Image: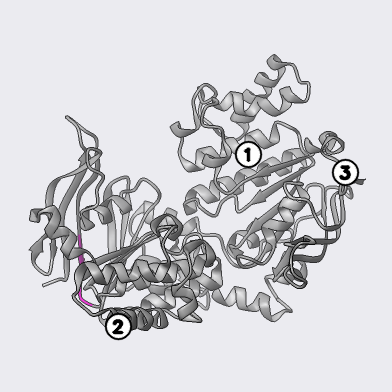
Amino acid sequence: MSLLEIDNLTVAVDRKNGKTVVRDISIHIEPGELVCLVGESGSGKSVSSLATMGLLPKGALKVTAGKILLDGENLLDLSPSELRDRRATRMSMIFQEPMTALNPVHKVGDQITEVLEAHTKLSNADKHAKVMDMLKQVGLPDIERVAGSYPHQLSGGQRQRIMIAMALILEPRLLIADEPTTALDVTTQKQILKLIKDLQREHGTAVLFITHDMGVVAEIADRVYVMNQGDLVEDGPVMEILATPKEDYTRKLLSSVPSLVPRPARASVSKKTALDVSDLNKFYGAGRFLAKGSATHAVQDVSFKVTAGRTLGIVGESGSGKSTVARCIMHLIEPTSGGIRVGGQQISGLSRRGLKPYRKKLQMVFQDPYRSLNPRLTIEESIIEGPVNYGTPKAQAKARAAELLDLVGMPEGSADRYPHMFSGGQRQRIAIARALAMEPELLVADEAVSALDVSVQAQVLNLLAEIQERTHVAILFITHDLRVAAQICDEVAVMQRGQVVEYGPTADVLGAPAHDYTRSLLTAAPGRDWDFPNFRPVAA
């Protein structure tokens, strides 16, 4: 008997004649097996996992057919109190974003202890010892300090390790991991994936790992299930799915994964320097009231240039200074020292009023378009806001907005709708259109595709390439995804601890890296041994 048997599960919207969102799916997982459930946003992956945990939002979604058997017991027949007892003791879940899953007002050690208090009768000393042992198992440093910390005092990777510790503290038979590494940089992601595999092996835990990252699938999966729009379309051993996919949808997912091999170098279309950054520095906490030595040197003597019509990528781990550089260039934060020239004009050190004429030359596309678009404004209102503020007649701005929405591939009628009415990929297209409305000389994209599915990511990257070819806009592309950098960037700057440690043409930096840190980033990239679009190992 399988440890987990999901048989003919159907989930629908909880109202009369509600839309079916998961249709008749069956997933079986053996003890000690790691199964990946893959598909794009809206495919039904997370809904299936929430149904298994008994966490479907009441009044929104409901199971209408099927069985979910854990060790032969149908979870759908259990009362809410019985389900609560099964969670943590027999099954547990790691969520995608630990900052929202952890309670911000309680120390993380207390939050793990709370699991033991709810499900065991251990003494305080035994609970403390068990928590410390679990923190050690998940590879956290200085475990007493970490246990006494609040979530905001820990890095993203450390918070995810806390979530894993909390999920495994009672050694459940089944662990469900819902996109636990999506927002992490490659080295932290590699550590978390290795941790889950090691703990699975040591504890004999079965793992259902939900992801849209085929590199992760290649790295850790024993078997794979592929979902598309609520249907299970293909399943099989991981090597079979990667090398001989049967369904067009699976082939599309694999073909959308960017290659780590850098694209051929492009000829320059212009000699004009759109952005020139020289000796940029940013200190945090450098005020006179703080103790000497307490300042953090977030960006140290960073210099680079971006030519019109070219894309410079800045890559590195979280905390390397990538986003700080972008925010200094945009003057969202004030640089401590250094020069920033846009179109040959020095803009560092200018007042807010002095910066206004240059703001339109610099536009930014943020990681999360849902947070950067005003939910109360229609798409048209968001796009025309900037040009109108700079004196463009409203009718002319509206006509330009219509052209831009067509340029970024949005459907007719989008202008009068609101951000929540669109998918994540469509919202990012809208954010790009809004940035282009100002006819900028430089577009700064800060992790602009990191949260998107691989096929949507491919569409947005192709869109940026097409726009650049038409408009010759320079792009500064901030990313932790080396595959994306290899395919979209002409030059790459690698940052580590606030410094640029390697800088040059993409083919040189990512094709033949000279610095140990760059090599370590490439080694950590999941699925680096697979040529996904051609369904074969790289060595073949």
Residue 510 versus residue 381: which sits nearer the camera? 381
Query: Which residues are the magenta region?
Result: 27-31
Side of 125 where 270 appears, left or right = right
Q: Relative to residue 291, is residue 78 depicted above or below?
A: above
State which tag comes first along the sequence, 2 or 3.
2
Amino acid, disc 3: Leu
The residue at which mark 2 appears reads as 125
- Visible residue check, residue 312: no
Residue highlighted by disc 3: 350
Magenta-colored stretch includes residue 30: yes
Check disc 1: other Cα within 10 Å, few if <14, some if 14-19, many if 20+. Answer: many
Instruction: Work out how far the residue at label 1 is from the one at label 2, CA to CA, in angstroms.
Output: 55 Å
For marks 1 and 2, the one nearer the N-term is: 2
Q: How many labels does the image show?
A: 3
Assign a secondary structure to mark 3.
loop
Task: Classify mark 2: helix, strand or loop.
Answer: helix
Between marks 1 and 2 in the image, the one whose residue lies nearer the viewer: 2
Specify the amino acid type for callout 1: Ile
Tag 1's secondary structure? helix
Q: Which of 53 and 493 is in front in this view?
A: 53
Q: Does the magenta stretch include residue 347?
A: no
